[in-house]
Image (tube, coloured by chain):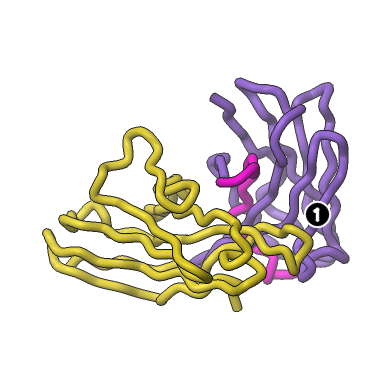
Chain colours: A yellow, B purple
C-alpha cells in the first residue's frame, strides 16, 4: 500500500485531455512538501516530467502540466499522443516517516 | 550534469546479502542526498533509503532491519547492502540523487534465486 494514492489506470483517445490524481495526507503533500511527477516507458528508468508541483524541465512538452492543492496533486496531459502511453508516478516526502521519500503506486496511461 | 551508474552481481542466492555500488560522475558526491530505489518486475517504485555525504542515513521503515547504505567520498561512490534476501527482493535497483526530485541511474536487475 503506497503512501500516495494514484488511480491504477486511466485512458483517453488521441487529442484528448486526461488527468492523474495523487492523493496524500497532512504529513506529506498537505505538510507543504513538493510533488514531482515521472514518466516511465517499458524497460527504462523513470524520467522527470514535472518538478516542484508545476515546473517542467527543459525538453518536456507544455502538453504536460502539474498542480497541487491541499493534500492532493494532479498531472494533466492535453493533446494525447500515442507516445504518451506509459506509467506515471508521483513522488513527495513524508514527515511522519522521518522525511522519507514516498511514491504513488503508479498509473498506467493507455492511449485508445 | 551528474550521472549515476549501478554495479554489482545480477544474481544473489536466497538468505545471502545483496551488494550494489553506485558511481557518481560529472559532479561531487559531497552534495545532495543519495538514494537507492527499487522496482519489482511489473510493480511500482519503492524507496529503500538515502545517505548524505556526511554519512547520516534514513531508511524505509519496512526494510530498515536489513539495509545498510554507506558512502565513500574518496571514490565518489555509495553502496547498498540488503541482507537475508528472498525472492521478494528480486527487482530493478536504481541509485539516484534525491534532493527534492529524483535524478535516476539507469538501473540494474538483481534476481534472487538458488
Residue A42 is inside the magenta segment = no
* Quadrant placement of the N terminus of chain A: bottom right
The magenta-colored residue range is B85-101
A89 sits left or right of A11 in the view: right
Pick the residue in front: B108 or A105.
A105
**Residue at horizontal 45 percent and vertical 73 percent from the top:** A6
B84 sits left or right of A6 in the view: right
Pick the residue in front: B30 or A34.
A34
**Quadrant hosting residue A86:** bottom left
Q: Chain of mark 1?
A: B
Q: Residues within 10 Å of mark 1 (few under 14, many from 20)?
A: some
Question: Where is residue A54 shown, x and y percent of the image?
Answer: 40, 50
Question: Where is residue A41 shown, x and y percent of the image?
Answer: 37, 53
A28 sits left or right of B1 in the view: right
Which residue matches tag 1? B58
Question: Where is residue A74 shown, x and y percent of the image?
Answer: 39, 64
Label total for image: 1
* Quadrant placement of the C terminus of chain A: bottom left
**Residue at horizontal 66 percent and vertical 57 percent from the top:** A101
**Residue at horizontal 25 percent and vertical 66 percent from the top:** A18
Pick the residue in front: B51 or A92.
A92
**Residue at horizontal 64 percent and vertical 24 percent from the top:** B25
Does residue B33 show up?
Answer: yes
Does residue B40 show up?
Answer: no
Pick the residue in front: A89 or B68.
A89
**Quadrant hosting residue B54:** top right
Question: Where is residue A103 shown, x and y percent of the image?
Answer: 57, 63
Residue B100 is inside the magenta segment = yes
**Quadrant hosting residue A60:** top left
Secondary element type, mark 1: strand
Amino acid at each position: 500500500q503506497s503512501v500516495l494514492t494514484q488511480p491504477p489506470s486511466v485512458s483517453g483517445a488521441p487529442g484528448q485531455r486526461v488527468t492523474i490524481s495523487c492523493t496524500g495526507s497532512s504529513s506529506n503533500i498537505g505538510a507543504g512538501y513538493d510533488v514531482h511527477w515521472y514518466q516511465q516507458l517499458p524497460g527504462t528508468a523513470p524520467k522527470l516530467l514535472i518538478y516542484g508541483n508545476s515546473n517542467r524541465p527543459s525538453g518536456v512538452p507544455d502538453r504536460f502540466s502539474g498542480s497541487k492543492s491541499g493534500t492532493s496533486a494532479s498531472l494533466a496531459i492535453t493533446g494525447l499522443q500515442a507516445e504518451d502511453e506509459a506509467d506515471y508516478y508521483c513522488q513527495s516526502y513524508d514527515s511522519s516517516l522521518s522525511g522519507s521519500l514516498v511514491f504513488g503506486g503508479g498509473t498506467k496511461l493507455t492511449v485508445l | 550534469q551528474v550521472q549515476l551508474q549501478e554495479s554489482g552481481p545480477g544474481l544473489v542466492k536466497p538468505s545471502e546479502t545483496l551488494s550494489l555500488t553506485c558511481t557518481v560522475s560529472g559532479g561531487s558526491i559531497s552534495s545532495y542526498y543519495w538514494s537507492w530505489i527499487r522496482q519489482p518486475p511489473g510493480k511500482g517504485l519503492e524507496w529503500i533509503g538515502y545517505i548524505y555525504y556526511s554519512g547520516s542515513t534514513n531508511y524505509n521503515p519496512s526494510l530498515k532491519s536489513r539495509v545498510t547504505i554507506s558512502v565513500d567520498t574518496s571514490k565518489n561512490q555509495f553502496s547498498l547492502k540488503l541482507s537475508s534476501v528472498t525472492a521478494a527482493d528480486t527487482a530493478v535497483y536504481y541509485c539516484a540523487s534525491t534532493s527534492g526530485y529524483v535524478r535516476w541511474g539507469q538501473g540494474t536487475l538483481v534476481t534472487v534465486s538458488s
